[in-house]
């Protein structure tokens, strides 16, 4: 049954606003630096990121099941509350215990969003017969993350003079506003009720994934790419801080997220032109080459080499998610999304900890370089999928 167009279009618009508020984070550019100041160690600082991701990994599949059972609106609201509490704990932290607790809540928030929000977007579009336009809408919705991150990073350039704790305290406000927005969503009728037994629900999702080799390769590639690139991204500002002054890091992030906004906004058109897998391959190759050159130089222009690849981030994310959504089943859409996210979270947790250890022992550039090398190992999976562009199986969800 086709659901009310106005309610579902309202969902899409509210997702734009919610995404903007959720990533309007003055403090984001300074996370590794702030954690290291409090804990006195890059290894411990990166362990905060690791604990967030371990929590996300542990809870990813249960929260996907929760989303399929309790609904998308409830899950967004719960995730927004956890995100607000996480930032508040960071802001008031004076030791690693409070930081780790904040990281745990942040990880819970992330995994609640992970499988849920793409499913929410897809089902809202499906309710009005527009699911084939998912990659266009999702690109624009995700561009709001970049817009929020970019504007908040630009503002942080001026706010950082008041101290990093002040910047973190201000970061609580937009998170609290995102909670308010989350209560305004409408549940899409396209959602299919999940089985009553959660274990059976998960078992069926795992069986469906195992029987779809194309999905397995996608999950493996995205897990490595996400885990390596995200852990490197969270740490690289600490490296850039020895090349640029602290106040300029906010400006750097603002420029990067501005390019990210453009990439996300245009991602639907880019994917229509070049298709999903070539977009993923090109992104990974460009990042490997540009970031390797930057690390070899290790001077004032190094951050620019890293910055230049920001425009390709969005098309890669949308291409990956569109490929995954086409392989998922309606009955386990959020659960399958959480399985994919679980794999990425495990890789992130391991590599974040490794980057911290390497940076403490061999220097910041070595830590970042390790992340760059590890991210390139996703290329064989994407290249194999490109060579085997015909689907391995005729999957009922392909559009």
Image: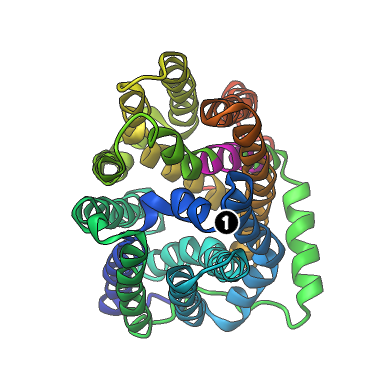
Residue 225 forms part of the magenta stretch = yes
Q: Residue 70, percent across and down?
A: 58, 83
Say left or right for 110 vs 309: right
Residue 136 placement (x, y as % from top left): 32, 49
Q: Residue at x 40, y 69 (%)?
A: 124
When asked about the image quadrant of residue 221, the answer is top right
Residue 281 is situated, as x and y percent measured from the top left of the image, at 50, 25
Q: Is residue 260 magenta?
A: no
**Is residue 330 in view from this perspective?**
no
Going 47% across and 60% down the picture, which residue do you hit?
118
Residue identified by numbered label 1: 39
Q: Is residue 153 above or below residue 213?
A: below
Observer-nearest of 217 and 350: 350
Quadrant location, the N terminus = bottom left
Res. 298 image quadrant: top left
x and y percent of residue 214 in the render?
66, 38
Residue 229 vs residue 321, the one in the foreground: 229
Residue interval drawn in magenta: 219-231
Q: Total of numbered circles in the picture?
A: 1
Type of colouring: rainbow
* Residue at the (42%, 32%) spot, across then down: 275
Work out whether residue 104 or residue 185 is closer to the camera in this orientation and state it.
Answer: 104
Crowdedness near tag 1: few (<14), some (14–19) or many (≥20) residues, C-alpha within 10 Å: some
**Secondary structure, magenta segment, majority class:** helix
316 over 144 or under it: above or below: above
For mark 1, give the secondary structure: helix
Residue sitting nearer the eye, 266 or 111: 111
| Viewer can see residue 182 | yes
User: Could you tell whether 360 is left or right of 28 in the image?
Assistant: right
Q: Is residue 38 above or below residue 362?
A: below
């Amino acid at each position: 049954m086709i659901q009310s167009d106005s309610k579902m279009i309202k969902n899409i618009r509210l997702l734009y606003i919610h995404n903007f508020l959720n990533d309007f984070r003055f403090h984001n550019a300074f996370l590794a630096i702030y954690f290291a100041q409090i804990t006195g160690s890059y290894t411990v600082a990166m362990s905060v990121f690791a604990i967030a991701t371990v929590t996300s990994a542990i809870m990813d599949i249960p929260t996907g099941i929760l989303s399929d059972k309790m609904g998308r609106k409830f899950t967004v609201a719960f995730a927004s509350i956890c995100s607000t509490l996480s930032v508040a704990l960071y802001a008031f932290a004076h030791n690693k215990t409070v930081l780790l607790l904040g990281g745990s809540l942040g990880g819970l928030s992330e995994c609640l969003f992970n499988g849920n929000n793409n499913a929410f977007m897809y089902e809202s579009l499906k309710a009005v017969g527009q699911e084939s336009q998912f990659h266009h809408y999702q690109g624009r919705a995700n561009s709001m993350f970049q817009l929020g991150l970019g504007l908040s990073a630009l503002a942080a350039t001026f706010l950082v003079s008041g101290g990093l704790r002040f910047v973190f305290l201000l970061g609580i406000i937009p998170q609290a506003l995102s909670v308010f927005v989350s209560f305004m969503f409408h549940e899409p009728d396209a959602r299919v009720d999940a089985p009553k037994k959660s274990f059976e629900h998960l078992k069926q999702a795992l069986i469906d994934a195992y029987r779809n080799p194309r999905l397995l390769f996608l999950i493996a590639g995205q897990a490595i790419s996400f885990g390596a690139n995200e852990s490197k991204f969270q740490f690289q500002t600490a490296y850039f801080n020895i090349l640029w002054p602290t106040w300029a890091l906010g400006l750097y992030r603002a420029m990067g997220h501005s390019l990210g906004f453009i990439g996300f906004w245009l991602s639907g058109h880019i994917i229509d032109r070049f298709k999903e897998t070539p977009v993923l391959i090109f992104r990974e190759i460009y990042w490997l080459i540009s970031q390797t050159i930057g690390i070899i130089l290790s001077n004032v222009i190094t951050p620019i080499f890293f910055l230049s690849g920001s425009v390709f981030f969005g098309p890669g994310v949308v291409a990956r998610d569109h490929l995954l959504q086409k392989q998922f089943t309606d009955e386990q859409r959020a659960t399958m999304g959480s399985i994919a996210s679980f794999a990425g979270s495990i890789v992130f947790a391991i590599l974040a900890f490794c980057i911290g250890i390497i940076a403490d022992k061999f220097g910041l550039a070595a830590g970042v370089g390790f992340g760059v090398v590890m991210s390139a190992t996703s290329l064989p999976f994407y290249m194999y999928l490109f060579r085997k562009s015909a689907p391995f199986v005729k999957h009922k969800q392909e559009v």
